[in-house]
Image (cartoon, grey):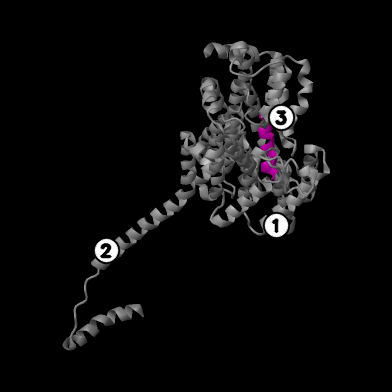
Amino acid sequence: MIDNLVLGFESALTPENLLWCFIGVVLGTVIGILPGLGSATGVAILIPVTLTLSPLTALIMLAGIYHGAQFGATITAILIATPGEASSVISTLDGYQMARRGRAGPALAISALGAFVAAMVSLVVLVAVAPFFAEVALEFGPPEMLAIMVLGLATIVVFSGRNLLLGCAMGLFGILVGCVGVDTGSGVARYTFGEVDLYGGVPFVEVMIGLFAIGELLHQLRQGSAEPIRARFRDLLLTREDLRRAAAPTARGTVVGFLLGCLPGAGTTLASFMAYGAEKRFSKNRRQLGKGAIEGVVAPDAATNAASNANFIPTLVLGVPGGATTAVLLGAFLVYGIQPGPQLFDTQPALVWGLLVSFFIGNVLLLALNLPLAPVFAQLLRLRYEILYPLIIVTSLIGAYTVKNSLFSVFVTLVFGLVGYAMKRLSLPVAPLVLGLVIGPLFEKSLTQSSALAGDAGVASLILGSTTAIVVLLAAVLLVAGPVLGRAIRGRTAGARDDDATGGAEAAVPTAPRTTANDEGSATDRAEPGDSDSR
């Protein structure tokens, strides 16, 4: 492996490759900031520009765009509640609340730092065990992916807060919205009402822009014009307490993101949601999540970056895309005459290891660029809202339009903007709706494939024949039943302690002497001081 890394550094550390890597991460950051564009679209648009470059240089630039877009999308998610990527949606929940409290700088800085740490750790693991993880990922067929989707849906319980029924209802609403389009099993259009633009389903990015950006904007307008955030410069810097609180969530997010990123087609969005769900379950400050907790920012961003690196395991080793952007990159490989697969590491080691080493270089460049600029980005919130709000509206609607160059996308954004506003007015949880919208189509796809494989035997028999699927489903059951069992156990323990305390108190109180008629005077005399004290 050492020889391969040396070869990779020799291939990547050329002036031309370093220049194009820098250009890629800068372009990726800008692309991520623009709502609706996204890394997949950015990579697809810029593939023709790279045709004059060598294959390694072109892939290094495109990979830089991929990684840069991840952080750029977080910038707008934190500052103006407008996620530029689907994976940055969950960062909006706590990141925007931190920004509203004058802590936009720490939110952006810890996001960049956590993403960098996760990227470095995941890249080391990627380089060390890519073939092994590829073999494990190859074992994940439709029944295993179906179990993973069930586990994902079970996290709706985590996102529901105290009102489980309401959270489940919003999750079902998200699944229902995700059902719009052509049925994957029969090919029949459903819930489209004859609208051709809905055949591909309700567009996810436009829905997110509407729910978060437009919905939050309408909510703020109803509350009246607020004064801009006037945070002092030292309030925009990370503290030692911030770093302490971010350490464990970064580690958890890295593990969750890498494991899910190894699965073909899992992408980064599911990883960010699962990492946030893990914080809801295991974080010491889980009660603060959703109110501006730093754990709610760093864990999803760490998971996103770890998953984006792990997505290259199935892409390079199996020739199967790990997510939407790696699917586009897979097409770029084919354009350059490169066939990803098990033999790629042997046939073109300089290209593969040079590309992997460029991931290290790209993430170092991103940290060097964006960590010092976090307080600068945060200054955007110093603008008066009379200026900032029109900018948000224009940016959101232009971003929605550029997704498909269609006014229908703008219409969807406005409709779900009203939905987001109504949900805020009614205090309905948004996260379960988004989770249902993300996982619903993936669940249906896995269920359809599993049904086709099982035939007359049924899906249950297929799942029972897979140890991995059974383990994952047991984890889903524990995720749902765990809080209920925990409350029951704590209730019994508290009741037992109360009983012991009551019994002990009763034993400690001396029994009053039995009085007779002859003792009434003395008994009264003994009672009078107590009565006097009480009075």
- Residue 437 visible in the snapshot: yes
Q: Residue furthest front?
A: 456
Q: Within the magenta stretch, is there residue 81?
A: yes
Q: Quick one: label 2 or label 1, which is nearer the N terminus?
A: 1
Q: Earlier in the sequence, mark 1 or mark 3?
A: 3
Q: Label 1 amino acid?
A: Ala
The stretch of residues the image draws in magenta is: 67-83
Question: Mark 2 belongs to which amino acid?
Answer: Gly
Q: Position of residue 448 (x, y in %)?
A: 61, 39
User: Measured along the vertical axis of the image, is residue 208 above or below residue 364?
Assistant: below
Q: Residue at x 46, y 51 (%)?
A: 483
| Relative height, residue 390 to residue 354 (above, below) | below
Of the residues tagged 1 and 3, which is closer to the observer? 1
Q: Nearer the viewer, mark 2 or mark 1?
A: 1
Give x and y (percent) for residue 202: 72, 44
Q: Residue at x 52, y 13 (%)?
A: 2
The disc label shown at residue 504, or none: 2
Residue identifier under label 1: 422
Query: Is residue 41 shown above or below 220?
Result: above
